[in-house]
Image: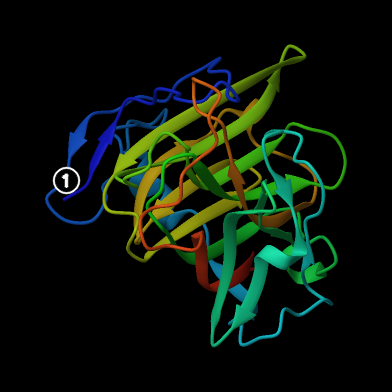
Amino acid sequence: MMLLRSARSRSSRTVLAALAVAAIVLGTGVASPAATSGEGEPEAARAKSSARWTKVATEQFAGPLDSSRWAPFQGVPGCCSDTVWSPTQVKASDGVLTLRNNPVAGTWLSGGVGSWNWPDATRQYGRWDARIRLDAGEGISATALLFPREGWPPELNFFEIFETWGARSQSMVTTHWLDGGKHAVSQQTVEGDFRRWHVFSIRWTADRLVYVIDGKVVQVETDPARIPDEPMWVGFQTHAHRDANGRMPQLPAGRKSVRMQVDWLKVFAPAA
């Protein structure tokens, strides 16, 4: 069972200027919030029928990491100064991308990759589907996102788990945009077991953003101010954080790292 609930930030990184709210208990999988269009038709139904897609790329992460497609992140993240991104924390092998988080010589290192060198995965409008899981572990956050080549926002997080959600029983989708020159966000939280594999999808056309988990719509954005109009690349990234008392994470018993794993990525263009 999964539950859609009101979004509440548990991270000082995120400013909630606008919230997308719902409270729907789901029998199986994930259902859409009860959003409606101007014509009164449920947005979920319109989202499913409003676009058709042509697959343009697939990444199976057979290994090693394809440097013509992916660039590992390096340095201190702008969002998260308690960790350092290092290429040593990134591995693609046996059909899985693994991004590790663990201390090395007293410094927490984290993994992240971006597709800005891969034209098929860096585009204006399209659909990105990825099968993702995240190890349990307090103090470690992770996201799959679309990000622009220059400037910020926009940013579209189609998978996001905060560091305070160590049990991985919640995930979130987030839209970042500028509202009168100020950063604004819309967020939707979904409850489930995200230590297990799930398929997360962002479907972006000129008139809407549709966030989908395991084939079910969880959030739809139709406000033109929230819909990017520039090319964006896809990335997967993790971070380590201090807690409210200033303490860095402790690795779960018996574990050498906390891992975000991606089984595959599929990229689609809107059909002509």
Q: Position of residue 135 (x, y in %)?
A: 41, 58
Quadrant in the picture for the C terminus:
bottom right
Q: Amino acid at mark 1?
A: Leu
The local secondary structure at tag 1 comes to loop
Instruction: Identify whether 181 is placed above or below 31.
Output: above
Q: Provide the residue designation for mark 1.
A: 26
Quick check: 140 above or below 16?
Answer: below
Residue 219 lies in quadrant: top left
In the picture shown, does residue 179 fall above or below 148? Answer: above
Which residue: 50% across, 27% down? 243
Q: x%, y% of residue 72?
A: 77, 63
The residue lying at 76 percent from left, 70 percent from top is 120
- Is residue 272 at least partly visible in the picture? no
Count every numbered label the image shows and give the total: 1
The residue lying at 29 percent from left, 45 percent from top is 169
Report the side of 26 relative to 196 (left or right).
left
> Looking at the picture, how far across and down is residue 245, in whole percent?
50, 20
Image coords of residue 165 (percent x, y): 38, 38
Res 153 → quadrant: top right
- Asked if residue 187 lies left or right of residue 92, the reply is left
Q: Nearer the viewer, residue 71 or 2?
A: 71
Q: Would you place residue 41 above or below residue 49 in this image?
A: above
Q: Quadrant of residue 17?
A: top right
Query: Callout 1: 10 Å neighbours few (<14), some, many (20+)?
Result: some
Residue at the spot 26% in from the left edge and 47% down from the top edge: 31
131 vs 38, nearest the viewer = 131
| Applied colour scheme | rainbow
Residue 47 seen in the current view? yes
